[in-house]
């Protein structure tokens, strides 16, 4: 059972979104430089793939290496498996993909936590991972 409130999840997501936006900004600079300062085509497949890879390595990298992103660290959250162990790289990847699925229908995968008997989201269930609120030391 997850002991993390939906509010705490969303606040952590907001922190991470700000960090991710700065990384996306940095990742966009080379595309602008290659186009001599002109706008990047929104239909550019290489640009879209680059943005997804930036997000993927941000989340999966932090989750796998330390169990938490910087936003999660700020709010004392840690990603763990159901058995309270560190998630594998594959579990983190599955969580990343299933988190996107959770957002697609107006965030329904997140709102699901409100009615779930174990307080879990869709991506918690799909990846067999959960967020854990750590005690302040």
Image (cartoon, rainbow, N blue to C red):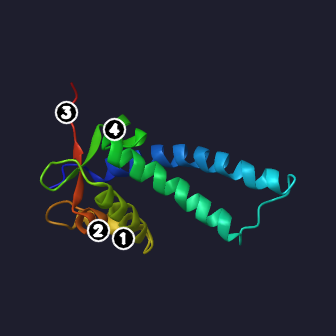
Residues tagged 2 and 1 counted as in contact (Cβ below 8 A):
yes
Q: Are marks 4 and 2 in contact (CB under 8 Å)?
A: no
Q: Which residue in the protein does label 1 denote?
A: 108
The one nearer the camera, 68 or 49, is 49
Where on the picture, by quarter, is residue 125? bottom left
Which mark is nearer the camera, 2 or 1?
2
Q: Horizontal and vertical percent for residue 51?
A: 59, 59
48 displayed left or right of 18: right
| Separation of marks 4 and 1 at Cα, in angstroms | 23 Å
Earlier residue among tags 3 and 2 = 2
Crowd rating for badge 1 (residues with CA inside 10 Å; few <14, some 14–19, many 20+): some
Closer to the chain start, of discs 4 and 1, is 4
Name the residue beneath numbered marker 3: 135
The C terminus: image quadrant: top left
Q: Secondary structure at mark 1?
A: helix
- Residue extending furthest toward the bottom: 105
Residue density around tag 2, few if under 14, some if 14–19, many if 20 or more, within 10 Å? many
Q: Nearer the viewer, mark 1 or mark 3?
A: 3
């Amino acid at each position: 059972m997850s002991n993390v409130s939906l509010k705490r999840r969303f606040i952590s997501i907001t922190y991470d979104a700000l960090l991710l936006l700065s990384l996306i900004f940095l990742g966009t600079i080379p595309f602008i430089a290659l186009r001599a300062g002109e706008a990047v085509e929104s239909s550019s497949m290489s640009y879209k793939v680059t943005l997804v890879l930036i997000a993927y390595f941000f989340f999966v990298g932090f989750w796998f290496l330390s169990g938490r992103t910087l936003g999660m660290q700020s709010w004392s959250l840690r990603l763990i498996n159901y058995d309270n162990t560190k998630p594998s790289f594959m579990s983190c990847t599955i969580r990343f993909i299933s988190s996107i699925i959770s957002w697609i229908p107006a965030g329904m995968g997140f709102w699901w936590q409100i009615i779930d008997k174990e307080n879990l989201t869709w991506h918690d269930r799909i990846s067999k991972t959960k967020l854990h609120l750590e005690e302040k030391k």
